[in-house]
Amino acid sequence: MPVNDISFRPYEKKRSILLVEDEPVNREILKLYLKDTYDVIVAETGKEALFVLNSSFDRISLILLDLNLPDIHGLDVLRAVREDLRYAPIPVIVMTADSEAEVECLTLGAIDFIPKPYPQQKVVLARILRTIELSEDRDILRYTERDLLTGLYNKEFFYHYALQFDSYHKDSPTDALLLNINHFHSINDRYGKSYGDLILKRLAGKLLALREKCGGIVCRSEADTFLIYCPHRDDYEDILTDIAHSVSEDEPSENRIRLRMGVYSCTDKTLDIERRFDRAKMAADTVRNSFTKSIALYDDSMHESELLAEQLIEDFVTAVKERQFEIFFQPKFNIRGEKPVLCSAEALVRWHHPRLGMINPGIFIPLFEQNGLIRTLDQYVWEDSARHIRDWKSNHHITLPVSVNVSRIDLCDPSLSGKLVEIVKSYGLDYSDMLLEVTESAYTDDPDQIVERVKNLRSLGFRIEMDDFGSGYSSLNTLTTLPIDALKLDMQFIRTAFGETTDTRLLEAMIRLAEAFEVPTIAEGVETEEQVNTLKTMGCDIIQGYYFSKPLPADQFEAFLLKNLA
Ligand code: C2E
Ligand code: CA
Ligand code: CA
């Protein structure tokens, strides 16, 4: 019967023990004791022990260490083991006849003692097993606390330790920081995942160094987001510049990474710890697309928008029930022929809030995307749009395709196509009556899954327009495999082309790029005749913008339709 049957843990392979002992008799006794249960690696001197550790530390479960060695003293071996990070996790049991040495051994990190002469075999084995299991339990705990890639804490433990940190620093001001890599997706995309991992590890290393300097704690909360909780200071701008520089300093300038940081300074410790980091994130998000600023502080205006956000979320359910959301329609014109021809429209939602008045989607859509409410809202918009399309058909025999916005969150919903099919069927429409606008950045999040979903929608007969093209940092590689039927240029290209200084080169390049996809190009945000003419010369096919009409409420849009199609 194996002596270690007190253990109920499965362990298929024999564990290895490093036995450091110079006296042949002692060695033989211990080898005899251990050989059925463990692989025993023997070292006769201190130097030999360190040599074995250097080559095999990752498979050694325990060190049995004699103190009286012929070369180095056992205590020095113990010290060397504890000082090397690679060996430090291996538990050490000291074997000695000298009870005086015990205190010193314990301070140096020995876990237990086996007296000489040796006790019975079963006593020795029980001690060894208990020590190994305790250390393995500690390892498991260490793994679950930590992110495997970077070795930093994970978010759950970080929050836990942050509260502990608070309890020791009740009255000293503490800052919550969030650090993120700009466009980390495209770094992964362009240079491969292992390069992305390397950057994350380097960044983690810098943050650990920062922690040494500033105190506090750090973690990787997800993908490329890191959190830092530390005593208050004012020089984060310099720190950030330093970190960003050192993470990619050997890289050519086009490969250098850009970081952004949000700082919630002197946190309110009565707030939930997650809330404190939400504030740091809010600040960081304000510099997400900035080329000039990479750091932002949470301030009063963000506090106000936080309050507004809470209010809007609270009011959402009632707003849907009371139909406070209204769909506006904005026409799109085909400009290829001599005269512009009305060819479709986009459905855009507005909120008539009973106290706050009319609210534009720019305020509430991003908010509802964060918490999934967008799914309910979008379904409301799709249905209401379908109802209007049906009414124009049945009342005026007008068939005009309407594009609706499909958020990236909708695309994660496996029942999305079912819902859309249901709407089309129940209003007696064709699939071609409803175009779906999917923003380019949706494809950057999880290209494979999104492409699959979009392909499926297309195979049902829906047509897909890629919205905000040029803003999503998708790689060209991804873009060319995407199933789409039209490209809508991001409005920013129009703004830059016809801004204070007219420079249409980038706009033209985007239209050229769009041509490679062999689908019609749509420009939105077009406000002047000059813009229309320039776009037409450049080969743009369809135009949407104030030049033709602002988004209109359904009744006014109906009148617009009748006039334009008359
Ligand atoms: P988007 O899909 O890119 O919509 C175009 C936005 O540009 C609309 O703003 C439209 O009113 C505005 N626009 C159109 N022509 C012009 C112009 O000539 N000049 C200027 N300055 N602006 C113009 P809106 O309606 O405020 O919508 C903002 C964003 O909110 C939309 O951007 C879209 O991303 C989102 N959104 C709107 N309605 C919905 C919806 O029902 N569902 C979802 N998921 N998102 C929506
Ligand atoms: Ca759109
Ligand atoms: Ca757009």
Image (cartoon, helix red, strand yellow):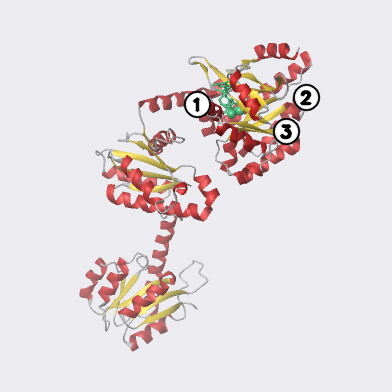
On screen, residue 477 above or below 547: below
Determine whether, in the image, residue 4 is placed left or right of residue 413: left
**Residue 396 in the image: above or below residue 24:** above
Q: Is label 1 or label 3 in front?
A: 3
Instruction: Name the residue carrying label 1.
Output: 313
**Closer to the camera, 32 or 78?**
78
Mark 3 vs ligand 2: CB under 8 Å? Answer: no
Q: CA distance from mark 1 to mark 2?
A: 33 Å
Disc assigned to residue 357? none
- Whether residues under marks 1 and 2 lie with C-beta atoms below 8 angstroms apart, the answer is no
Q: Does the residue at mark 1 contact the one at mark 3 (Cβ under 8 Å)?
A: no
* 340 shown above or below 276: above
Name the residue: 24% across, 66% down: 107
Q: Is residue 127 visible?
A: yes
Residue kind at label 3, given as amino acid type: Phe
- Rendered location of residue 563, percent (x, y): 72, 11
Residue 442 location, x and y as percent?
A: 58, 38
> Which residue carries the number 2 mark?
428
The residue lying toward the viewer, choosing from 461 and 137, is 461
Disc 1 is placed on an element classified as: helix
At label 2, which amino acid type do we have? Gly
Looking at the rendering, which quadrant does residue 436 occupy?
top right
Marks 3/2: CA–CA distance: 15 Å
Residue behind mark 3: 462
Label 1 CA crowd tier, 10 Å (few <14, some 14–19, many 20+): some
Most extreme residue toward the bottom is 25
Q: Quadrant of residue 92?
A: bottom left
What's the residue type where badge 1 is placed?
Ile
